[in-house]
Image: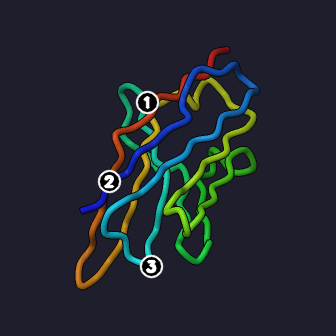
Amino acid sequence: QVQLVESGGGLVQAGGSLRLSCVASGSIFSVNVMGWYRQAPGNERELVATITSGGTTNYADSVKGRFTISRDNSKNTVYLQMSSLKPEDTAVYYCNLDQRRFRSYNYWGQGTQVTVSS
């Protein structure tokens, strides 16, 4: 089993910055993909960014150039540095871990609220 614990959410003014962290613990494979997703009220959960254990990144078009995903494999931790925040970035941000060994194992954190005021 795997547990994901997010931290770093909060309230920030438009144009500001926040850094989210997610620590994974438990049975973690050396090859995996960690990522951040978000869900605003009334909307479906959407991809924000992902990063493989090898460091390959992928971003939603809406956050390219503003958000940076990174990870520390030695600490099983993924980060999301968010800059130039906009009110439309307001959402609950969820950490995700996907790993595969004969089948897919997919895990979610409990979520952390990010609120951007105008």
Q: Amino acid at mark 1?
A: Ala
Residue name at image x 43 percent, y 73 percent: 32
Position of 39 with respect to 59 (left or right) is left
Residue name at image x 45 percent, y 42 percent: 6
Query: Which structural element holds mark 1?
Result: loop
Query: Which structural element holds mark 2?
Result: strand
Q: Amino acid at mark 3?
A: Val
Dot 2 and dot 3 residues touching (CB under 8 Å):
no
- The image shows residue 47 at horizontal and vertical percentages of 48, 51
Task: Tell me how the rendering is colored.
Answer: rainbow
How many badges with numbers are in the image? 3
Residue name at image x 38 percent, y 33 percent: 43
Residue 31 numbered mark, or none: 3
Position of 104 with respect to 34 (left or right) is left
Along the polypeptide, which appears first: circle 2 or circle 3?
Answer: 2
In the rendered view of the protein, which quadrant contains the C terminus?
top right
Along the polypeptide, which appears first: circle 1 or circle 2?
Answer: 2
Establish if 42 lies above or below 78.
above
Along the polypeptide, which appears first: circle 3 or circle 1?
Answer: 3
* Residue picked out by circle 1: 40
- The image shows residue 35 at horizontal and vertical percentages of 49, 57
Residue 3 numbered mark, or none: 2
Q: Nearer the viewer, mark 2 or mark 3?
A: 2
